[in-house]
């Protein structure tokens, strides 16, 4: 996320500020973080959809600017892929990025009459205060035996200015996200961390930036903007490393650390 300077230091938790979509769309195509996530989304959704009959239905909940939606449509070419987004500002970008069905609605009040074979929700759940209601809604959207692809931020000890600026409500432990999923009826088939190779660097960077925040009175939004500055050589190296991780995870292997739960 790219964020702008606030009028004060308070940052409300929960939800998503639609004014950020323009800046987010400007970096997603190039930034290593988004490129790595897209690769893994593509690999996993392609593997799942390969076992489905043509004409299957796929939904991305919280499709935002349509960055991930493009990967889903590419991976699930024999099915119908729908993007669901509550904020119209995000859908404006999604419409430009790929042709297909887009719906503006809250996932808890979906207008769909048919259930989906595959539902994806990528780095969205942590923004929603009504967590369990949302998970129940996802469960109801799936056909019997349908699959949910979900990503959420890992580890409460990584909570930082980034989460505050991003309006996260929470980060998750492995047991916590598994328990919440099983409570509404899901059976967790595969769970791993992702972005292990950058985990130590992010931890150190955020600790050092916290000191900068205190020393220089830098706001959480300024610090978060710094994380999404694209440095060409570094961005290329991290893209390559995370690409290897994505291939490893897509083959069903686990990673011992990371910034995200899959």
Image (cartoon, grey):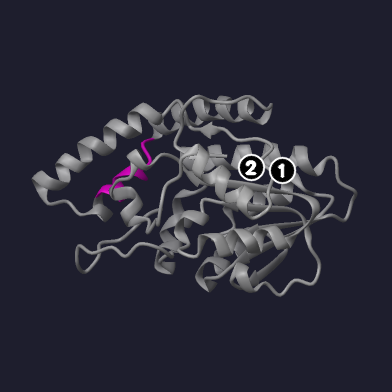
Residue that lies at the very extreme toward the right in this rendered image:
53
Where are the magenta residues, as a range?
Answer: 223-231
Identity of the residue drawn at 28% across and 49% down:
161
Above-or-below relation of 241 to 87: above
What crowding class fits label 1: few (fewer than 14 Cα within 10 Å), some (14-19), or many (20 or more)?
many
Q: Name the residue under label 1.
A: 45
Q: Does the magenta stretch include residue 162?
A: no
Q: Would you say residue 99 is visible in this rendering?
A: no
Image coordinates for residue 7, horizontal then vertical, percent: 21, 69
Q: Would you say residue 181 is visible in this rendering?
A: yes
Q: Is residue 228 magenta?
A: yes
Identity of the residue drawn at 63% across and 61% down:
136
Marks 2,1: beta carbons within 8 A: yes
Image coordinates for residue 93, horizontal then vertical, percent: 55, 64
Q: Tell me the tag on residue 176.
A: none
Helix, strand or loop at disc 1? helix
Image coordinates for residue 123, horizontal then vertical, percent: 51, 51
Count of number-bearing discs: 2
Residue that lies at the very extreme toward the left in this rendered image:
215
What crowding class fits label 2: few (fewer than 14 Cα within 10 Å), some (14-19), or many (20 or more)?
many
Q: Nearer the viewer, residue 131 or 36?
A: 131
Helix, strand or loop at disc 2? helix
Identity of the residue drawn at 84% across and 50% down:
78
Identity of the residue drawn at 46% across and 32% down:
258
Query: Quarter holding the C terminus?
Result: top right
Q: Tell me the tag on residue 41.
A: 2
Q: How far apart are marks 2 and 1 (CA)?
A: 6 Å
Image coordinates for residue 12, horizontal then vertical, percent: 32, 65
């Amino acid at each position: 996320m790219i964020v702008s300077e606030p009028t004060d230091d308070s940052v409300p938790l929960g939800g998503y500020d639609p004014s950020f979509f323009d800046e987010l769309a400007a970096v997603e195509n190039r930034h290593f973080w988004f490129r790595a996530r897209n690769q893994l989304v593509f690999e996993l959704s392609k593997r799942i959809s390969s076992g489905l009959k043509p004409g299957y239905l796929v939904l991305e909940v919280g499709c935002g600017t349509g960055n991930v939606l493009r990967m889903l449509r590419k991976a699930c070419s024999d099915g119908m892929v729908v993007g669901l987004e509550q904020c119209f500002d995000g859908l404006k970008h999604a419409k430009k990025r790929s042709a297909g069905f887009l719906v503006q609605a809250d996932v808890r009040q979906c207008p769909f009459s048919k259930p989906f074979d595959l539902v994806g929700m990528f780095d969205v759940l942590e923004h929603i205060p009504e967590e369990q209601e949302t998970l129940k809604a996802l469960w109801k959207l799936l056909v019997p035996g349908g699959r949910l692809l979900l990503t959420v931020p890992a580890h409460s000890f990584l909570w930082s200015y980034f989460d505050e600026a991003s309006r996260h409500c929470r980060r998750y432990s492995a047991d916590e996200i598994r328990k919440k999923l099983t409570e509404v009826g899901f059976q967790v088939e595969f769970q791993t961390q992702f972005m292990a190779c950058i985990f130590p660097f992010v931890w150190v960077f955020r600790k050092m930036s916290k000191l900068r925040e205190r020393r220089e009175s830098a706001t959480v939004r300024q610090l978060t903007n710094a994380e999404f500055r694209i440095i060409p050589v570094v961005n290329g190296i991290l893209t390559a490393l995370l690409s290897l991780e994505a291939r490893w995870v897509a083959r069903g292997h686990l990673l011992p650390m990371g910034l995200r739960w899959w």
